[in-house]
Amino acid sequence: MKYFLLTGTSRGLGEALAEQLIHPEHHLICLSRTMNKALISKDPQMDYLEIDLNEVDQIALVMEQAFSRIDRTNAEGIYLINNAAVVTPLSRIEQGNTEQFKQNLTVNLLAPIVMTSTFIRLSEPYHAEKRVLNISSSSAKNLLPGMSVYSASKAGLDVFSKGVGAEQGEGADAVKVVSVWPGMIDTALQTEARNMDKETFASADIFQMVKDRGMLASPADVATKLIKLLLGDHFIQGTVVEI
Ligand SMILES: NC(=O)c1ccc[n+]([C@@H]2O[C@H](COP(=O)([O-])OP(=O)(O)OC[C@H]3O[C@@H](n4cnc5c(N)ncnc54)[C@H](OP(=O)(O)O)[C@@H]3O)[C@@H](O)[C@H]2O)c1
């Protein structure tokens, strides 16, 4: 049995990943703030645990619950996908507020750090393939006005993935960690960015333009590529991959 722990499965890319991972030999453990009844109804063996990733102190407890569902006698692979994120604040930095900065860096960077730390610790007794896929963004490198906090969170996630990859190394029981830039996807995150007023978010026009020109990939197509990466031979320890 392969076990998949995924965050942010209420919608968007996380939902598409979960849908495509449903399989009799896969046990999905969704870690999500918002219930997704349609998703749950598609997979009788799915576990769906509630967590608000702003509450980082709760992560260890929820991860312990998640690992209690993993059977040591049949686990051939255990995979964590840190997918949940927020794009806000979308404004010049002097117009943002501390609460927005805190929430962005908590959900996008601190939570994946705590999730990865807990995953490595709790998966230690399991002799299975162990992998962490951190969903990052080319925003880590391609900077747009009004997105400095999001970019900083994703750049931090990339550096974190490289650092933990170096720490884990190539031993038989190492947890492999990869950061991925999935490209632009037609999700609520994009809608939020293009619907911002131009006065506040100078880059809103760019998001509108990519939508108008049909440059957004479907969540399903991106999920297919990500699953191929996660389960394939090109999951190279400590790398940042653009798909
Ligand atoms: N869309 C793009 O063009 C694009 C491009 C590059 C990278 N990405 C990355 O792809 C990933 C998925 O993004 P998406 O486009 O699918 O975005 P999305 O549609 O906005 O979905 C974001 C997910 O994150 C969850 N989330 C947000 N705050 C949370 C919190 N405090 N606790 C728990 N879950 C929380 C949301 O859950 P709720 O329903 O509870 O809010 C939702 O399930 C993100 O890491 C994003 O940075 C997206």
Image (cartoon, helix red, strand yellow):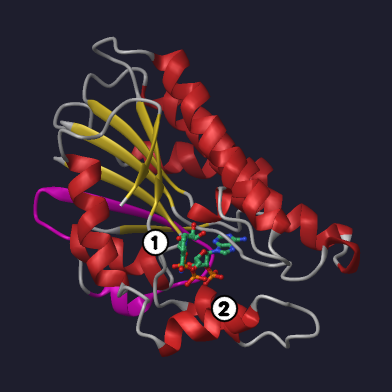
Q: Which amino acid does label 2 sit on?
A: Ile
Location of mark 2 (residue): 206
Residue 92 seen in render: yes
Residue at horizontal 32%, vertical 73%?
217
Specify the farthest residue to the top. Answer: 171
Q: Which one is earlier in the sequence, the residue at label 2 or at label 1?
A: 1
Residue at horizontal 55%, vertical 32%?
159
Residue span colored magenta: 22-41
Residue 192 seen in render: no
Kindly identify which numbered label has been placed on residue 43.
none
Classify 212 as above or below 201: below
Decide: few, some or many residues near mark 2? Use Cα within 10 Å; few <14, some 14-19, many ≥20.
few
Classify 27 as above or below 156: below
Kindly identify which numbered label has been placed on residue 183.
1
Residue at horizontal 72%, vertical 70%?
90
Specify whether residue 34 is painted magenta. yes
Give coordinates of residue 110: x percent, y percent: 64, 41
Q: Are marks 2 and 1 in contact (CB under 8 Å)?
A: no
The quarter of the rendered structure image containing the N terminus is top left
Nearer the observer, 101 or 77? 101
Classify 90 as above or below 212: above
- Assign a secondary structure to mark 1: loop
Q: What residue type is labelled 1?
A: Gly
Give coordinates of residue 68: x percent, y percent: 36, 37
The count of marks equals 2
